[in-house]
Image (tube, rainbow, N blue to C red):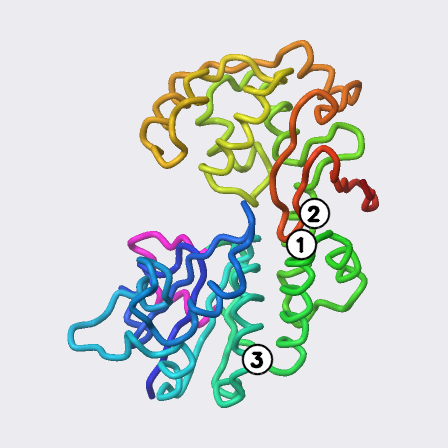
Amino acid sequence: MQRLILTGWGGGSELARSGLAEIVIPFHFQFEWGPLPQAEKLSAYFAAYTADLGPADHWSDWVRWPRGAKGRELSLAEFCEPYDTIELWFGATSRDQLQLVWLLDHLSSCPALAQKLGLRLLDSDLMFSPDYDFAKGEPHIPVADVGAEEFEIARLAWSAYRAPTPEACIDLLHRDLSALLMLRPALLELLAELPSPLTGLGATEMRFLEMLARGYANTNGLFHLRSQRRTYVFGEIELGYLLEGLALGPKPAVAGLGDELRTIDRENVGARHQVYLRSRLSLTEYGKAVLAHQEDFSRHNPIDRWWGGTHLTNDRLWRYGAVLVKP
């Protein structure tokens, strides 16, 4: 029986070495930061390969191909057709859940594949250790069927997240989402990153201020002590962008971040990382006031970032606390 694994961010390398499937296809689009890719780009990613695509713009670019393997130029659906079983391995992270609903939304238009699909949901992420024993671990990860209900929830979730306001995502929380067990907590984590009605900051930015108030003075602690930060949506690069917003604006809430970050190209990850490492951080008096809910950060600093299809700016600042607050 031929087996194919489609998986989320981080799962490709170890799953490819596991021997569980003939081919493992990981997906590397990141939907939780920045403007969403254009629909045409996402369609081209799944379609047959064409020469005008750039590197990493086609699903086949991320596959560790066995010697002699064929099919790189096919559409994803065409490549999947010969396989008897197609398993979807996705973690609990917001990144993985967004990739999952995007993928299911696409696969829902491929009825010939639907009966072959099985979904394995991991309760953490897909970061398997090099010595992870798949032979022992795999049987404990149940395989769920994928049917009309799963496709419908995925379609609704992907459409809601791409909408120009977060309202559809709030409406989605009033539905039964149990067909995709980890979608609701992922949506709640994403919504928590919208600006607060009291402070104008999202959950991760507020956790940064809390950790600094408790004496954490370097970026390693802020970025990597996830159990202390207690937010899990963003990776290290995006965490750096959030910290820069707090530290390098007209009225900073954080002091001590290297000012040279203003001029280092964002693509120069190595140079930026070195600045992060040597920075010693602290709260400004204004930062202490924001942390105490006495000041609104957005009143004195520019806001310009994306939440799914929603462009957050000072003039269009959707906020979320107990309820969604319109600009």
Question: Circle 3 sits on which residue?
Answer: 108
Q: Mark 2 points at which residue?
A: 191
Q: Where is residue 25 in the image (x, y as percent from the top left)?
A: 36, 68
Residue picked out by circle 1: 187
Q: Using residue 277 as the reference point, say whether residue 154 is left or right of it.
A: right
Q: What stretch is highlighted in magenta?
A: 126-140
Q: What is the CA distance from the residue labelled 1 to the residue labelled 3?
A: 21 Å
Which structural element holds mark 2? helix
**Amino acid type at mark 3:** Ser
In reply to whether residue 132 is colored magenta, the answer given is yes
Query: What SS does tag 3 mark?
Result: loop
| Residue ID at (46%, 20%) | 218
What is the crowding at mark 1: few (fewer than 14 residues within 10 Å), some, or many (at least 20)? many
Image location (x, y in percent) of residue 243? 54, 27
Q: How far apart are marks 2 and 3 (CA)?
A: 26 Å
- Pointer 2 or 3: first along the chain: 3
Q: In this view, does 309 lie to the left or right of 280?
A: right
Considering only vertical position in the picture, is 243 above or below 90?
above
Q: Do the CB atoms of the residues marked 2 and 3 lie less than 8 Å apart?
A: no
Type of amino acid under label 1: Leu
Q: Image quarter for residue 192? A: top right
Type of the residue with mark 2? Leu
| Dot 1 and dot 3 residues touching (CB under 8 Å) | no
- The answer to whether marks 2 and 1 mark residues whose Cβ atoms lie closer than 8 Å is yes
